[in-house]
Structure formats: C-alpha cells, structure tokens
Image: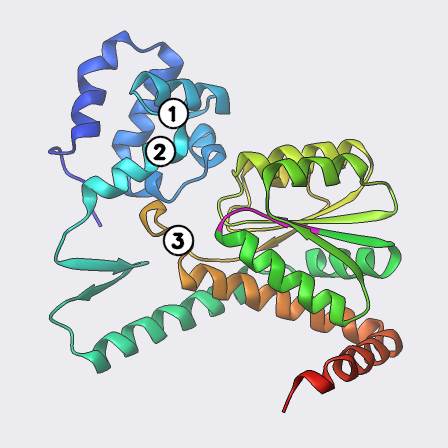
C-alpha cells in the first residue's frame, strides 16, 4: 500500500506546516517520511519516532481536524484504498483472483501471522503470566470492540479451568471493575492497538490498586504496556480500515491457547476436575 502526494490529508498537512509548533513539525516530518508505517503505528510508536511526547501527536492530529490519532490513521488508510483491491495485511486480494487463489492467499497470510506471533512471543513473559495466574485469586478480563469478543472467549476458557473469571467490554463497567481490583487479583487487558482509551484508563486504575496486569497486544510500545507486569505480543499489521480483522483475532486466540494450556498443565489437578465438572453440567443440554 502506498499513499502518494494526491492524499488530501498530506496536502492539508503541507498547507498548515508552517503554522505548526516545532514539535508538531517533527511529527509531520515523521508522518511524511513513512506514511505507510504511520498507518500501522501506535501513538507511542509515532511519538518515539518523532522524538516528542504522545500529547504532541494528539495535538498535531487535532490541528489537522481529527479527533485523535486513530481517526487520523483511518483517514490515511481510506485515502490509500484501491477500490478494485482488498489488502489483507500485506497480501493483495483482487477481484480477479479465483476462489482457490483467494483461499490460498488468506491461508498463507493467517499462517504467517501465527508464525510471526510465535517468533515474537517471549517465554519469560509467558512464564510471568502463568506464575501470576497460579498465585492470584480472581481474574478480570477486559477488551473493547472486537477485542471484547476475544475477552469473552478467554473468560470461557479460564472458567472451564476453574478460575474465578469475570469479563467486561463496556468502558464504564471496565473502569468500575478496575476500581474494585486488589493486590489479590489479575487484570488481563486485550487490545490490538494497545491504545484503546477505555481499556488503558482501566489498566491505570487497576495498577494503582496493586492488581497484577497482563496485556495482550500487537504493539510492544503502546500506552497499555506502560502499566503491564507481563506483556504478551501478537504479530499482525492491522490497517485501521480493517480493524478487528480475523487474522488479528486468530493471533490473539493463538496466544490465549498457549497461555491457558500452560496454565492448565501447571494446575493439572484443579483444571482436570473443573473441565470434568463443567462438561457434566451441560450434558442434558446436548442430544
């Protein structure tokens, strides 16, 4: 994907450049030098590249008429779209592709996402997360939007293993739960971007209360990771125009599968009993 000089956003950027502060001009220069990279960046990524604070990036976006960084990225992505092509990550799927070719391309892309996630996943961070799960009382799992659906999947899996697990996907409910979290609790925050405000704000509240924070995200350098005790990374370059892509969700589920399997093996007796009792509880609901 490329964004040329015809981009309305870049044209606007050029027109107001001289009116920007020196720090905001550094952001503008960073964007202009790598527009494609900006589309896939977190606000922290761009702030570090421009050597400015995250608030400067937000101010820069607002001076261009956007509510924030995510809307700015979305507009850049929209302006790059070729109506005859669907960009599935870095693999281009054309309407000229036959069904078999399309299936092969998507399968290749998803396989690459899982392998890249495996390469990125750090054993030390996994071990920290598993150890925390063994030694804390309650598990809160939070996510917003598409990541909220993943959070529900995670709650189901942990509940089957005998955890006192709760899940919330509404920003207000997340905040209230985090306000009640204690040193005896774990909070697992799931966010592809790592920049979802409702979730990041909740992680901050829970961290202040002493809860153990695990985050599952695509961006090692993003607002959510600043509050995390254990960081589990997935690898998928998600264009904001295609937010909530299945490939991103597959990577999240893959990491959660690894995490829950490791935890179940470390807590084998309890997990086995819980899996058996929960399975029996629904036997009369199946033909």
Q: Which residues are magenta?
A: 141-145
Q: Which residue is mark 3?
A: 237
Cα separation between marks 3 and 2:
17 Å
Q: Which residue is mark 1?
A: 67
Q: Which mark is residue 71?
A: 2
Residue 282 visible at all: yes
Q: Is residue 144 magenta?
A: yes
First in residue order: circle 3 vs circle 2: 2
Residue in the image at 28% along x and 43% along y: 36
First in residue order: circle 3 vs circle 1: 1
Q: Is residue 60 above or below residue 280?
A: above
Cα separation between marks 2 and 1:
6 Å
Residue in the image at 75% along x and 82% along y: 279
In the visual, does 143 lie left or right of 251? right
Residue 53 visible at all: no
Q: Nearer the viewer, mark 3 or mark 2?
A: 2
Callout 3 touching callout 1 (CB < 8 Å): no
């Amino acid at each position: 994907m490329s964004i040329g000089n015809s981009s309305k956003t870049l044209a606007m950027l050029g027109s107001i450049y001289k009116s920007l502060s020196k720090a905001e001009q550094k952001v503008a220069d960073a964007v202009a030098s790598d527009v494609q990279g900006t589309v896939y960046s977190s606000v922290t990524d761009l702030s570090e590249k421009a050597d400015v604070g995250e608030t400067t990036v937000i101010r820069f976006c607002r001076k261009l008429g956007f509510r924030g960084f995510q809307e700015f990225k979305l507009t850049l992505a929209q302006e790059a779209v070729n109506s005859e092509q669907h960009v599935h990550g870095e693999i281009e799927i054309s309407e000229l592709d036959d069904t078999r070719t399309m299936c092969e391309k998507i399968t290749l892309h998803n396989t690459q996402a899982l392998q890249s996630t495996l390469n990125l996943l750090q054993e030390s961070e996994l071990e920290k997360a598993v150890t925390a799960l063994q030694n804390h009382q309650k598990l809160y799992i939070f996510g917003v939007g598409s990541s909220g659906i993943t959070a529900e999947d995670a709650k189901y899996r942990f509940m089957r293993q005998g955890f006192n697990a709760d899940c919330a996907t509404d920003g207000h409910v997340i905040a209230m739960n985090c306000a009640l979290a204690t040193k005896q609790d774990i909070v697992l925050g799931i966010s592809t971007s790592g920049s979802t405000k409702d979730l990041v704000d909740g992680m901050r509240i829970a961290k202040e209360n002493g809860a153990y924070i695990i985050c599952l995200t695509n961006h090692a350098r993003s607002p959510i990771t600043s509050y995390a005790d254990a960081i589990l990374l997935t690898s998928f370059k998600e264009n904001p125009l295609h937010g909530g892509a299945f490939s991103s969700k597959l990577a999240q589920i893959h990491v959660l599968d690894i995490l829950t399997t490791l935890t179940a093996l470390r807590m084998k007796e309890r997990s086995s009993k819980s899996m058996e009792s929960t399975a029996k509880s629904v036997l009369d609901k199946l033909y």
